Image (cartoon, rainbow, N blue to C red):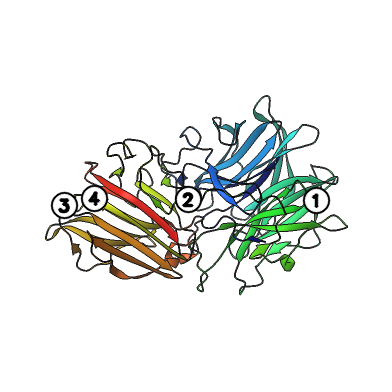
Amino acid sequence: MIQNPILPGFNPDPSFLRVGDDYYIATSTFEWFPGVRIHHSKDLNNWRLLTYPLTRISQLNLIGHPSSGGAWAPNLTYNDGVFYLIYTDVKTKSGPYKDCHNYLVTATNIEGPWSDPIFLNSSGFDPALFHDEDGRKWLMNMQWDFRKKEKTFHGILLQEYDAEEKKLTGPVRKIIEGEDHVLEGSNLYKVNGYYYIILADGGTGFNHSVSVRRSKNIQGPYEQDPMPQILTARNHPEHPVQRAGHGSLVETQTGDWYMAYLSARPLANKECPLGRETSLQKCIWTDDGWLRMAEGDGLPTAETEAPGLPETTFPSRAEKDDFNESELSFIYQSLRVPVTQDWANLTERPGYLRLHGRESLRSLHRQSVIARSIESYAMQAETVVEFSPDTFMQKAGLICVFDEMDLFYLHVTYDEKYQKVIQIIQHDQGEYDELLESPVPVKQDQSVYFKVVILGERLQFYYRVASSEWNEVGPALPFGNLGDEYGGKLGFTGAFVGVCCQDLSGQKTYADFDYFAYKNL
């Protein structure tokens, strides 16, 4: 059996692809850089993070983007020896408007190099490319309507793409009309003479689902599946797997069908700090040509039958990163900007990650943050920092973050009374707070060890110096604050843990981190 989620932690909006004996899933990254994660498997059970295609600012410039903007809903396809990746760069997401630009990049090797982007359109998000049997290519995307009296979901658009001219061509056709609920994440497949559109239905919250339409003609009309939602937990609030939707299909070498879809594992209070994850479920086709889930009666499942492919495992990632390599592991991402030697490097002091402090934790531009997604409700992470601040404007330490509005930050800074101290900062829906009434003094030349342990809803920080025992520091904190359901926010990512450094004086004072360790308990 395959255990779900196959991609735990922040891995939403899966686009599922098979090329020969290799399986790939691309997932959204939003404001985290580099853009779009591509995961790889041989057997659908064992997965590894393989690469990021959007590694250059020329492909994805996120500076100034709102949190949960940026790279939305990638679509990964393959045709005639070329990989095609379509993605949306969302520059405005709040209010009535969506400034969302759709681009295409290509590569002949999944690990790159990937081309500079080709601009497609800006009419809506969640674009997808379909390669038809006659050699023609078609782009679909939902159309967003900002007008007051209209449905925000205005319909699904279809337009031909000319691969030679590298541009869209011909008329834009609306193949599905707008409805009162959102239909997005459209993926197109041709099976047994029918064109099937797999739709993300009802928004990405607890009302999320997968619905299906089909037609004999790519331009429609499309008929609704007699089962309104073929996958959803919307009517089962007690179900342990929620928010299932945004499905993407693959047929295996042996003729089995599987759907990758996003899902979430909420806490008891319905908050989802792990973010939207990727799950997998076997599918079947009915005698009258409709798609159904093989298990669960339309509910997302905690496991699914494996396809019986030869098992292929990958080396497990070391729990402790000693920063002894020449390049930073790509398990880490940065906020909005690429990692460059001027602010984050492993060379100025070999065996250490050196971060030069830059802008504040509220900045949408140039923060010095290196972090990775949290994958489990039972985990711990730790690091050690050498840092010599001489003003309260300088900080460095261990951060657990959803976005600039909600975070917990255990760090070293400067206090006029005690000089070098430990403090905890919280951002709670944008409200700044310091959680230690009296900061903890430490000696100027001491390295400081930081640790965070998460057990369910409880997040607890610890510190130690030299060979001393771990000391609990600060109150137990609500891990659920780092989820996109907290406070009713319109966010789409998940909780990250990592290291960071700030210097609001502009001196770019650096902090050295000797290691970073992460373990699911």
Query: Disc 4 designates what residue?
Result: 386
- Residue 403: in sight, yes or no? no
Q: In front of the other: label 1 or label 2?
A: 2
Q: CA distance from mark 3 to mark 1?
A: 68 Å
- Judge by depth and name the residue closer to the eye, 400 or 119: 400
Verify CB contact (< 8 Å) between mark 3 and mark 4: no
Q: Which mark is in front, 2 or 4?
A: 2
The kind of residue on which mark 4 rests is: Glu
Residue 55 shows in the view:
yes
Find the residue positioned furthest to the left. 417
Cα–Cα gap, marks 1 and 2: 42 Å
Residue located beneath label 3 in the image: 445
Percent position of residue 379, x then y: 44, 63
Left/right of residue 276 with respect to residue 160 in the rendered view: left
Crowdedness near tag 3: few (<14), some (14–19) or many (≥20) residues, C-alpha within 10 Å: few
Q: Looking at the picture, does residue 202 appear above or below residue 115?
A: below
**In the image, what residue occupies the spot 19% across and 49% down?**
388
Label 3 and label 4: CA atoms lie apart by 8 Å
Q: Secondary structure at mark 4?
A: strand
Q: Residue at x 65, y 67 (%)?
A: 233
**Which three-letter amino acid code belongs to the residue tagged 1?**
Arg
Residue marked by disc 2: 317
Query: How far apart in space, not on screen, are marks 4 and 1 (Cα)?
Result: 60 Å
Residue 229 location (% of width, % of height): 73, 62
Q: Are marks 2 and 3 in contact (CB under 8 Å)?
A: no
Q: Quadrant of residue 472?
A: bottom left
Of callouts 1 and 2, which one flags the residue occurring earlier in the amino acid sequence?
A: 1
Mark 2 to mark 4 CA distance (whole Å): 25 Å
Mark 2 neighbour density, 10 Å: few (under 14) some (14–19) many (20 or more): few
Q: Earlier in the sequence, mark 3 or mark 4?
A: 4
